[in-house]
Image: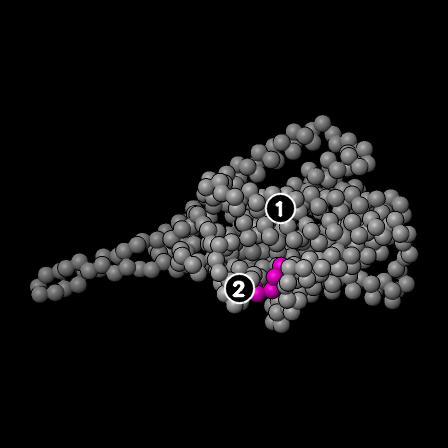
Amino acid sequence: MNALLYGLVVVIWGTTWIAIFLQQGPVAAPVSIFWRFAVASATMMIVLVALRRLRRLALRDHLYCMLQGCCVFCFNFWCFYTAAAHINTGLESVIFSMAVLYNAINSFIFFGQRPPARFWTAAALGLIGIITLFWNDLLASGWNASLPTGIGLSALGTYGFSLGNMISMRHQRNGLETMTTNAWAMLYGTVVMGLIALFRGESFMPEWTVSYMGALLYLALFGSVIAFGAYFTLVGRIGPGKAAYSTLLFPLVALANYFLFFGKEALNLLPVSWRANARRLGRKATGTGKQAKTIPFPTAGSYEATTATVKAPYTHKCTVCGRTDVSNPELEFRYCSKCKGYYCYCQDHINNHVHIQ
């Protein structure tokens, strides 16, 4: 049973990034999050009421569900969506894998479950590995404020997820059913996220396209109802520390699916140095890496060298400065969710441009 729950969590959450990618566009992140959990909570409530599985909760339990909803179904996702404008998704997914560390520490703080001595050595090695893996990203950013902001938001969102794990553990230790507490927590998180979007003056109109609505339904039904149910059940069965091991596989599953669906755009999930080397190897293999090619033509009894420039293809181009992922492979490119349409910007202009309406 535990293996099945692990498999569901890894496969579903390892592929939800595709749906999030498809939701990028004119709809603001808080609105997309609101609709995701609105559909998910409504579905869970209807199913539980129909099956007569929606249990009564005490007022104290409702308050904990409200706190869980804010931690897991509201603020943490807002942190992740906002962080995506500052750092690449590869770094974001690796930081989320630190849920293992957070869960172990929080389990000790809240439940007195002391981690083994070797845990601290493993945690230190893991942190060193993260720094080593993305050291070139840190250098390429020039240590500007954008990178620490993205890392801080991702770490904060991951910690919020961990706190939600602790609350779920509390629910199950008190004999409360996971699906009932999840349904109420999602409902409370949806209300809070809706109030945030309303306060920010966002439009609640979704994008009525097949890709956006399909992504919304996948995130709501599979990424929220099924995956969160499986994960929190796993938390109750084996503890939050071991359950969080599943997050270590998310980057691998996400990257494999990115290659499967989007090909060379998967390079954007890799560290800067890896992306640059991969692109150089690709251009060298295809012959597009040469900036100029000399072709001889016969003229007036002699041969003169005529230069013809072969333009290298690119995947992303900044709408403001015109730089591309080919001319500047060290840059990160992202689409702006507030611009009307699909407009791409480099890391220097994603937060510094006039939104196109």
Q: Residue at x 67, y 53 (%)?
A: 77
Q: Was residue 27 drawn as part of the magenta stretch in this picture?
A: yes
Q: Nearer the viewer, residue 274 or 99?
A: 99
According to the picture, the residue beneath numbered tag 2 turns out to be 339
Q: What span is colored magenta in the figure? A: 25-29
Which secondary structure lies at badge 1? Answer: helix
Q: Is residue 157 left or right of residue 317?
A: right
- Mark toward the viewer: 1 or 2: 2
Q: Give the x, y percent position of residue 112.
A: 81, 33
Q: Amino acid at mark 2?
A: Cys
Q: Residue at x 62, y 31 (%)?
A: 124
Secondary structure mostly taken by the magenta-highlighted segment of the chain? loop
Q: Give the x, y percent position of residue 17.
A: 62, 56
Q: Give the x, y percent position of residue 64.
A: 82, 48
Q: Is label 1 in contact with label 2 (beta carbons under 8 Å)? A: no
According to the picture, the residue beneath numbered tag 1 turns out to be 154
Q: Was residue 262 drawn as part of the magenta stretch in this picture?
A: no
Does any portion of residue 285 appear in the rendered image?
no
Does any portion of residue 345 appear in the rendered image?
yes
Q: Give the x, y percent position of residue 94.
A: 60, 44
Q: Amino acid at mark 1?
A: Ser
On residue 304, which mark appears? none
